[in-house]
Amino acid sequence: MAGDQIHLGIKLGYTLFLLVLVPVYWAHYGPKNFLWFSDIALLTTGATLWLESPLLASMMTLAVLLPELAWNLDFFGRLFGPLRDVNLLVRSQ
């Protein structure tokens, strides 16, 4: 629905979540952790909520969707089933 605004509670809740998550991740994993596509999308989603930008939201969806789907397929395939030996993303030597 064009013209609908994102509720302020959602914006504040997500911002509070980021204000807790980012320092904890920074301390535990270091700043290099934030170079992963999923972490970039996590941070950009905060800007997307405040700017209410469909362009930013769709950019992050497209940038993250395929790599995350491939990772999940590989992870759960090796965890549960017939793809256990396929090893799509990580080549062991």
Image: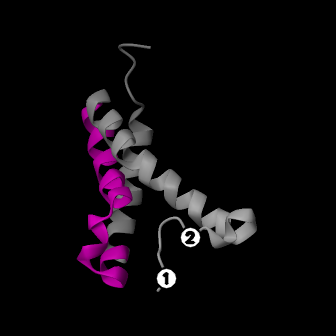
**Mark 2 in CB contact with mark 1 (< 8 angstroms):** yes
Q: Position of residue 44 (x, y in %)?
A: 28, 48
Q: Which amino acid type corresponds to the residue marked 2 in the rendered image? A: Asn
Camera-side residue of 66 and 46: 66
Amino acid type, mark 1: Ser
Q: Residue at x 35, y 60 (%)?
A: 39
For residue 37, what is the image quadrant?
bottom left
Q: CA distance from mark 2 to mark 1?
A: 8 Å
Q: Earlier in the sequence, mark 2 or mark 1?
A: 2
Residue 41 % position (x, y) = 34, 51
Q: Nearer the viewer, residue 32 or 84?
A: 84
Is 42 on the left or on the right of 69, as rendered? left
Up/down of 23 relative to 45, above or below: below
Residue 2 picture location, percent across and down: 38, 13
Q: Provide the major secondary structure of the magenta segment.
A: helix
Look at the picture and state if 83 lies above or below 25: above
Look at the image and say whether residue 82 sits in the magenta stretch.
no
Residue 13 can be seen, yes or no: no
Residue 30 screen position, x and y as percent:
28, 80
Please report the bounds of the magenta region as a residue range.
Answer: 25-52
Quarter of the image for residue 47 reads: top left
Q: Residue at x 32, y 82 (%)?
A: 27
Q: Decide: is 27 above or below 84.
A: below
> What secondary structure is found at the residue carrying circle 1?
loop
Q: Which residue is mark 2?
A: 87
Q: Quick check: is 50 in the magenta stretch?
A: yes
Is residue 11 rendered to the left or right of residue 31? right
| Residue displayed at 29% across by 56% down | 40
The label shown at residue 92 is: 1
Q: Who's the residue at 51% across and 61% down the image?
A: 71
